[in-house]
Amino acid sequence: MFEQLRDRLGDTLTRLRGRGRLTEENIAEGLREVRMALLEADVALPVAKSFIEHVRERAVGQEVLHSLNPAQAVIKIVNDELIALMGEHNDALNLAARPPVVILMAGLQGSGKTTSVAKLARFLREREKKQVLVVSADIYRPAAIEQLARLAHDIGVDFFPSTVEQKPLEIAQAAIDEARRRALDVVIIDTAGRLHIDDEMMAEIKALHGAVDPVETLFVVDSMTGQDAVNTAQAFNAALPITGVILTKTDGDARGGAALSVRHVTGKPIKFLGIGEKTDALEPFFPDRVASRILGMGDVVSLVEEVERASDKEKTERLAAKLKKGKGFDLEDFRDQLAQIERMGGLSGLMDKLPGMGGMPAMQDQTAARETGKLIAIINSMTPRERRYPDMIRASRKRRIAAGSGTRVQDVNRLLKQFAQMQKMMKRMGKGGMAKMARSLQGKLPGMPF
């Protein structure tokens, strides 16, 4: 997400950095390019104009033109204004209300609403330790009920059964009664989507909202529809008291205009980003972290949190104890680290959060993911003894390992070389594995202008 905007802004800000001193003319020229970058990223015109005006007011002030490093001062202003545009801070769900907390999901058909119900249920179960019940009130698409039932089973949350013969209001109230009877924490209600906004749809969801009185009403919208995403969010907000937005399919949206426009146009916060198809691909929306990514400064805080979640605590502790005793980092440990990267969304997801590394072409396709899978396959083709003592792997063993993993001897050689480099790094780090490596990145990587 934001690749297009990040590249354009990066070029403009690099040119500003190249100037020894900044004048009002330099700044005006740079802001024209920033405005074009925003519009090309499908940011709504009123939003782009307001943003540029706020930056201009601050950038032509004395603190910038007479500062020791005016270009960095401008970058800080752009960063601050991006954060202000998207909402200053993360707006978390209100889970402190009397249980069961009712969450109503609304959106157009095809926006990823049903999948988002499952993602949100998994998020609440795993990260907030809540007992969740999901229910489908979409009586117009039988497949929606079946889809949610299957997803609920996959992620291990309770599903309240419903049929197309029932009324949406009857389904929702029965689910809430069930959650209350079983003392569950949260009920998430999936509602019917439509191909377009119509009076019948709005009347139905208004009646449902009025009857169940949800604590949270979340509008789910496909970020890849750009301006349409903002327009439909605005229309829903006029009809329903929505409390927040979930932007889906952001992993496929190179522009990111919807993320920059929704808060300004609707006044409602983006609460979550859908970042992939899997049920764990949902992350809370933090404006400061997103602004940092847009400006190419990475998102080390999210990276550290992700590493902590993906870490197998027992394996990490075993590795730390092993390194502390002076025992070497072997290929089984290396395989565990590779598997951990896979759980974090692969190398592309990892690199996107590192300062100066987001948007690297090699990391944006499937090549990196295939490479990681290949490395794991090669290690799996080795005997336990070979994994513990890599120095014993000579020519004949390499040929056997390559044949067993469906790779070439050159691939085995490349893995052993990468392993040797990782072994040296782990020896320097002493203990802690990837979690410690990620923490050590925080505040120590180049590219941070302030």
Image (tube, grey):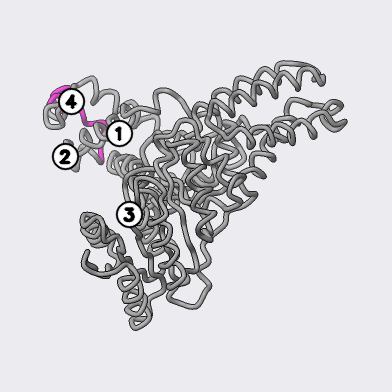
The alpha-carbon separation of the residues under discs 3 and 1 comes to: 31 Å
The alpha-carbon separation of the residues under discs 3 and 2 comes to: 44 Å
For the question of whether residue 245 can be seen, the reply is yes
Task: Check the picture and name the quadrant holding the C terminus.
Answer: top right
User: Which amino acid type is shown beneath numbered disc 1?
Assistant: Thr
**Contact, CB < 8 Å: mark 1 with mark 4?**
no
The alpha-carbon separation of the residues under discs 1 and 4 comes to: 13 Å
Q: Which residue is mark 4?
A: 407
Q: Nearer the viewer, mark 3 or mark 4?
A: 3
- For mark 3, give the secondary structure: helix
Viewer-closest of 131 and 261:
261
Q: Position of residue 20 (x, y in %)?
A: 78, 16
Residue in the image at 67% along x and 45% along y: 84
**Contact, CB < 8 Å: mark 3 with mark 1?**
no
SS assignment for the magenta stretch, majority: helix
User: Which amino acid type is shown beneath numbered disc 3?
Assistant: Thr
Viewer-closest of 34 and 381:
34
Q: Position of residue 181 (x, y in %)?
A: 34, 83
Residue 383 image label: 2
Q: Which residue is mark 3?
A: 114
- What is the magenta range? 388-399
User: Which amino acid type is shown beneath numbered disc 2?
Assistant: Thr
The alpha-carbon separation of the residues under discs 2 and 1 comes to: 19 Å
Q: Nearer the viewer, mark 3 or mark 2?
A: 3
Q: Which residue is mark 1?
A: 372
Quadrant for residue 288, please give it: top right
Tell me: residue 397, above or below residue 410. below
Q: Nearer the viewer, mark 2 or mark 1?
A: 1
